[in-house]
Image (cartoon, rainbow, N blue to C red):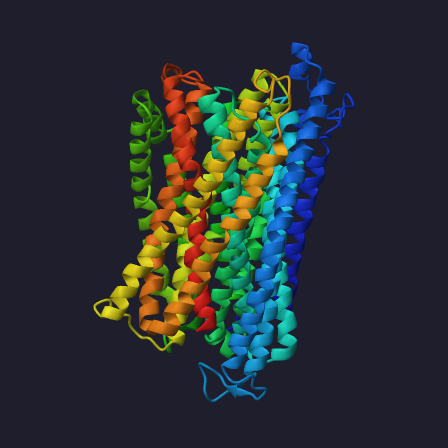
Amino acid sequence: MGSALLPDLCTEIVIPVCAVIGIVFSLFQWYLVSRVKVSSERGATSPSNNNKNGYGDYLIEEEEGINDQNVVAKCADIQNAISEGATSFLFTEYQYVGIFMIAFAILIFLFLGSVEGFSTKSQPCTYNKEKMCKPALATAIFSTISFLLGAVTSVISGFLGMKIATYANARTTLEARKGVGKAFIVAFRSGAVMGFLLAANGLLVLYIAINLFKLYYGDDWEGLFEAITGYGLGGSSMALFGRVGGGIYTKAADVGADLVGKVERNIPEDDPRNPAVIADNVGDNVGDIAGMGSDLFGSYAESSCAALVVASISSFGIEHDFTSMCYPLLISSMGILVCLITTLFATDFFEIKAVKEIEPALKNQLIISTALMTIGIAIVTWTCLPSSFTIFNFGTQKVVKNWELFLCVAVGLWAGLIIGFVTEYYTSNAYSPVQDVADSCRTGAATNVIFGLALGYKSVIIPIFAIAIAIFVSFSFAAMYGIAVAALGMLSTIATGLAIDAYGPISDNAGGIAEMAGMSHRIRERTDALDAAGNTTAAIGKGFAIGSAALVSLALFGAFVSRAAISTVDVLTPQVFIGLIVGAMLPYWFSAMTMKSVGSAALKMVEEVRRQFNTIPGLMEGHAKPDYATCVKISTDASIKEMIPPGALVMLTPLIVGIFFGVETLSGVLAGALVSGVQIAISASNTGGAWDNAKKYIEAGASEHARTLGPKGSEPHKAAVIGDTIGDPLKDTSGPSLNILIKLMAKKVEFCC
């Protein structure tokens, strides 16, 4: 059916070179961020006489007579406290997760090896009985290795993201003294460091693993890429605990700090008198940064592995066409180059000079990366695929044209952009939905909650249609392979997506540091503006993760039913229907567990914060320091303890249902969990984001309407704070964790069955 224009040797070079370019670019961005010195030396933040990007500008503190050296020293101390707290928590969490990782790796080896009695003899291939494949013992060993590789890469992705964020938060605060544009550049460059490191490392490790495994498997590509699927399972398994544990940590501290500090004591957010303030800022890094990094790495690994598995039993694998086989990796390679160019539009080609330019700059990142990536996909498709080929489709080979596969990837890419814009519309305080939620605070917290819930439910409609259209188009053209590459298309600009997502928590921390360091009100206004835009970008990142998880889960579900020899799933049979309703219930059960965990931890936090305010003399007056360490310990202990039950629910349910009720019931469970989980995840994330920005809309008072609702401490503002408090665990714990639930359940079944 023809061959690709790009020779195999070029493919061998292009993929690792693009990954290395991504790593080098991220390190260069880190170097630029490091030029902003967290030091008390006057002039340390101005390493160049060049006025571009703000170097050499005067400082607001100098204008207002504030002691600059004292402020910088305070920023450095606060940054160290946040960094130490985040590092301590992640090390504690990873100790528990490491035990699970080793135990589950042993289970994978025992389960896969026992299928053929740990046979060391070659066996007929699953999809081509006339051909002999490597023994079951080899599959067990290499699958276990790839699982560990994925798990370790996921953990490293989260940890590096946290270290970068805690390195950049105080630097963003210090640059805010020169202008909002300077602070924006530092925060965005820091997010780009995480985005490019994750995308490039994920691609490079997967590519190296494939080539090392190929030394043993040789021509047995079916067995090779079957073993590689463990990479995705390892990534998602670690992401589950990172997301749940980090989410519980951050929201326990956030809720405790808000309820006592802002509502009861009427002190500002991030006030240094609040005992939970350090734990709150630590939580932004371990939940929204480390958790999100592991989450999106898991989605990337899952979609890549799903596409490679289907391709290995299609004409690409049968004819040993290496370039075409690596099409998913080449798409990711092109994505790194496209995102590199896109990042320059935010940091070098244009400069932000006003608050109102922040959100458009972030929105332009989505538009530019999507437009450029569409061209990139066309180039990769034309050079790396033959004009026609066959794709495995439930026991048959479906003939596909290369332009049809281009449309599959492109529809996923543009569906992601649509989800991003819809998410922005429903969570940004620049538009009427959030403004309506803020206006509802006039009559109290109850109406605020009602309006917020209605907004979240309504925000599901367009993203679901976008996902449905992407599924229909991609499946019509290229069956399950089309769905897998559509998910990869949605994640092809992951470096840009993570950059704008990580920007949010960095800006949030920067605002907290400005408040705790006693910096001027004008600086806090700038960091608040950065933070408000960051809430929207964080919601956009969650939307991408949820949408891609839906596509990946469907691709994995298709692989499962194909391997289980199920040609159709009849919902009218009792076994399947029971599975559907039970599966649809699981996201509610999972959400209940995570929400209650946040509530329990927050209860302890509230009691501790109240105790300190009541028993430490001079704390409220600012004459005494609070006991930050106790609050950090409460969040740490609660998150470690509470992350186990939700994780067990996700990991054990597919095994229990499959063993005791059979594959038909299990098919229904997976379908029900997928359909229900996507809806709840989108609704929860957008509801929480809208409540948060409604509060910030009132606090900022940037419009006449907002000023009629404020200022801080007014009754509408207190109602908005209560709504934000309710929304915190929705948008940062339950909502984003659900996308891991649906893809991990599907992956676990596809992997083991």
Q: Is residue 145 left or right of residue 426?
A: right
Q: Is residue 15 left or right of residue 673?
A: right
Q: Is residue 102 left or right of residue 707?
A: right
Image quadrant holding the C terminus, namely bottom left
Question: Furthest residue to the left?
Answer: 572
Q: Is residue 457 visible?
A: yes
Q: Is residue 582 left or right of residue 420?
A: left
| Residue 731 at x, y percent in the picture | 43, 41
Question: Furthest residue to the right?
Answer: 41
Q: Residue at x 65, y 60 (%)?
A: 16
| Residue 363 at x, y percent in the picture | 47, 36
In front: 451, or 597? Answer: 597
Q: Is residue 296 visible?
A: no
The vertical placement of 405 against 539, above or below, is: below
Q: Residue at x 42, y 31 (%)?
A: 724
Q: Residue at x 40, y 64 (%)?
A: 653
In front: 99, or 172? Answer: 99
Question: Furthest residue to the front?
Answer: 615
In front: 739, or 393? Answer: 739
Q: Residue at x 42, y 24 (%)?
A: 697
| Residue 511 at x, y percent in the picture | 57, 27
> In which quarter of the view is residue 542 placed?
top left
> In which quarter of the view is residue 78 placed?
top right
